[in-house]
Image: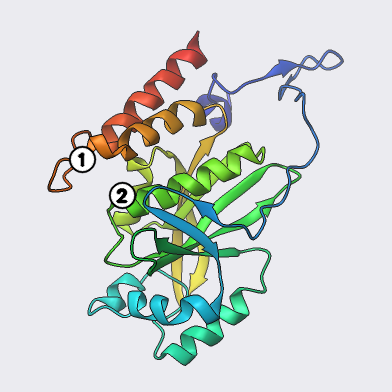
Amino acid sequence: MTDFDMHFDPQIPRETDVASGLPIGPRLVATGPAPRPERITLEGRYCRLEPFDASRHAEGLFQACTPPDAGARFLYLSEEPPRSVAEMHAWMTDKAKSQDPLFFTVIDATRGRALGRQALMRIEPTHRVIEIGSIYWGPEMSRSRISTEAQYLFMKYAFELGYRRYEWKCNALNAPSRAAALRFGFVYEGHFRRAAVVKGRSRDTSWFSILDEEWPALQRAYETWLRPANFDEAGRQRQRLSALTRIASSETSVQDGA
């Protein structure tokens, strides 16, 4: 028995190839490519995601990107904090031309202020795989209803387009990002050693994903958590998202084993 056989997951979906008798992945009903995501506004209750527009977003995003702890917030990103509004404007103008990554600004729906940014990236329509990345959530939105809804809006958009796999990857040393992935309902898939060089330093990468069959239960969890009734007068959550996503994950596991 090989090392691969010893660690092979018997739950991996498979069929048997008639000619060879070897295991093979199940045939898909829909095999065409998924549509590419577009530069459209995604509307939520607490925030909206607007395609990058430097003329409208640069000043607000500069403010969000330059809090006193900006160095720590940018430590695991590939770029440094902007030094001026003009630099922010130039960076956004360049990134707004990109199709992959496809950048969005996170706007507070109540105050109309830019609080952060995120991107859909490593977009593979043929394989129906897509990733959320290049995330910067400023101090006014991190660990809040806005950041959770910003994540939810991307997930919902990706799965409605027909993507089968939605990924989250982060520096393996970034403990808050790893914890956030689990809170958001991602499944940890593994540790990729020396996966990248970022800012002249070696980076190991942690991989997480959500699959399309896991999304319906997770969608219910997100929508339950995001309801105004889930928060008291002081804005404190009544139910934790992590508890709801764990329940959703267990429901999916039961269905898979049925």
Q: Which residue is rendered at x = 47% and y = 80% of the image?
A: 58
Give the label on residue 174, or none.
none
- Do callouts 2 and 1 mark residues in contact (Cβ within 8 Å)? yes
Q: On the image, which quarter does residue 70 sit in?
A: bottom left
Query: Which residue of the protein is positioned furthest toward the right in this rendering?
Result: 19
Residue 134 in percent (x, y) is at: 49, 64
Q: Could you classify mark 1 by the number of other residues whose Cα lies within 10 Å: few (under 14), some (14-19), or many (20 or more)? A: some
Give the label on residue 231, or none.
1
Q: On the image, which quarter does residue 242 sit in?
A: top left
Most foreground residue, 109 or 141: 109
Q: Which residue is rendered at x = 39% and y = 90% of the image?
A: 83
Task: Label 1, secondary structure: give it.
Answer: loop
Q: Is residue 240 visible?
A: no
The amino acid pointed to by label 2 is Arg
**Residue 68 vertical position relative to residue 257 in the rendered view, above or below:** below
Task: Label 2, secondary structure: give it.
Answer: helix
| Mark-to-mark CA distance, 2 and 1 | 10 Å
The amino acid pointed to by label 1 is Phe
Q: Which residue is rendered at x = 43% and y = 52% of the image?
A: 150
Q: Could you classify mark 2 by the number of other residues whose Cα lies within 10 Å: few (under 14), some (14-19), or many (20 or more)? A: many
Most foreground residue, 155 or 126: 155
Quarter of the image that includes the N terminus: top right
Tag 2 residue: 145
Q: Is residue 145 visible?
A: yes
174 displayed left or right of 233: right
Q: In the rendered view, how is the structure colored?
A: rainbow
Residue 225 in percent (x, y) is at: 31, 36
Most foreground residue, 191 or 89: 89
